[in-house]
Amino acid sequence: MFAKQTTRNQQLETSNYAPRPPIVVVLGHVDHGKTTILDKIKQTKVAEKEAGGITQHIGAYQVSHNEKKITFLDTPGHEAFSAIRSRGAKVADIAILVVAADEGVKPQTKEAIQIIKEADIPFVVAINKMDKEGANADKTRQELAESEVQVEDYGGTVPVVELSAQKNEGIRELLEMILLVAEMEEFSAPTEGLAKGVVIESHMDAKRGLVATLIVHERELKTGDWIAAGSAYGRVKLLENFLGESIKIATASQPCVVFGWESAPGVGCEFQAVSSRQEAEKNAALKAELGPPTLFAKETGSEEQKTNKRIANLTIKADVQSSLEAIDQTLKTIHSDEVEYSVINFGVGNIGDNDIKNARATGSTVLGFHVGIDGSAKQLAERDQVKTQTFDIIYELVEAVRSIMSDLLDPEIKRIPLGKLKVLATFKNMPKSQIVGGKVTQGKIERGALIDVIRNGALLITGRLGQLQHNKADVAEVSEGLETGIRFDSSAQLTLQQLIKEGDMLEVYQEEKIKRTI
């Protein structure tokens, strides 16, 4: 540590470097509390000092703790982080891995661990929901160790903080731990020359034109600077901070909103301030000459993988080419062993008649990003029952694709036991039905429920309770202790071996179909 301090101090003295705030990203499994943690930090460290709080969502904000600043990337986690990282841009300095104490390590937790390791950045484990029933921090630590994350109090090097974001407990300790990690890492940036950084959001503002949110990584970005990002360029006509306030300069690690683009920069592109319009045009032209990347190309799997997967067909329309690139990069973070998406058609511009016709022919859902739907196309879509959706936020589009893919998954079947009936007599046999009588020995039985016929402890046949009588009257249900007559319905013709006998036990239940998600 001492040697590192000496080296860094020498660097600061000789190379015009200056300390900068850490940039932090929050990752973890869905519903483990990432958003709540970010919201609590935002409310306690920003809103208390700013009348009205944050005025707009720009994907990043800064807080002050112990008179030191921390920048948080306020993104929906994995997709945003992976999409930006896939462009080769350095996004964050420190990660917070959120794990719920009542659920422990889940699939997306493991995915987040892999993302953090690939990004090669230090991280802090936040064990959240310590207030919940069933919270077990020790078990969570053990599961993390099994996922190759050794926290400090388990003999490792990864700091851990226990908290309840819902009750606003442990937030201060989390911020202090982030600052401690930042102090150890000694983040700095050069102060001389032209600014560099990364684009984290980009969209069209109806009143003010193309807008991009940037994180400055090096030096200072000023009003009037020319900048290039990928094949896009522009001049900084107006700079705003994350509160929507006009500023003249954005410093290293500071999130800012830039107005004045000639075309929209792609999410995840690195930006570079340049000395003139000519240089900005030249940089953009060089990137444009390389040509846009092959969009929506899928990796080819084995024939077995192809035939086993169900496919959600999509048509995607966006305002500009760079938006298509950003959508492509972000969609690639969706993975499933059972279903995949296929972009059949894509392009720039409003959703038109041809898009609807092609979607109808290919069974596609039409998704638009920062575009509208032509009036005639809207009527055509309604007539032909082609699903169309438009979005202004890229991550909402990605969640829509996840939902479309999830619709193709077989639902999870949850069995809900209702009751048991012991067969005391059999009355009438029909090709696909049988009428029997018995006594409800447990719970209750309901008309329309499913029935497993159990003989000598083994399943004989499954069917449905078609008709239910008590005291010779049709009823909807019969409770425990009462005798009843039922009609057992089979989906196929009953064989002699499948006929219900006296002494058989009928287990009556319902099935609930639960939509699975990706």
Image (cartoon, rainbow, N blue to C red):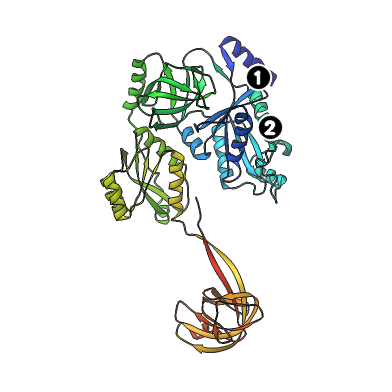
Residue at the disc numbered 1: 4
Residue 92 seen in the current view: no
- Residue 74 lies, in percent from the top left, at 54, 34
- Residue 27 lies, in percent from the top left, at 57, 38
Vertical position of residue 492 compared to residue 209: above or below: below
Q: Identify which amino acid the numbered label 1 is placed on.
A: Lys
Vertical position of residue 261 compared to residue 477: above or below: above
- Residue 66 lies, in percent from the top left, at 68, 24
- Residue at screen point 48% across, 83% down: 433
Which label belongs to residue 471?
A: none
* Relative to 102, 509 lies left or right: left
Element assignment for label 1: helix
Q: Residues within 10 Å of mark 2 (few under 14, many from 20)?
A: some
Tell me whether the residue at label 1 lies in contact with that at label 2, contact meaning CB atoms closer than 8 angstroms.
Answer: no
- Residue at screen point 51% across, 28% down: 90
Q: Quadrant of residue 174?
A: top right
Residue at the disc numbered 2: 172
Q: Identify which amino acid the numbered label 2 is placed on.
A: Arg
- Residue at screen point 34% across, 32% down: 292
Mark 1 or 2: in front is: 2
Residue 145 seen in the current view: yes
- Residue 474 lies, in percent from the top left, at 53, 82
**What is the CA distance from the residue labelled 1 to the residue labelled 2?**
28 Å
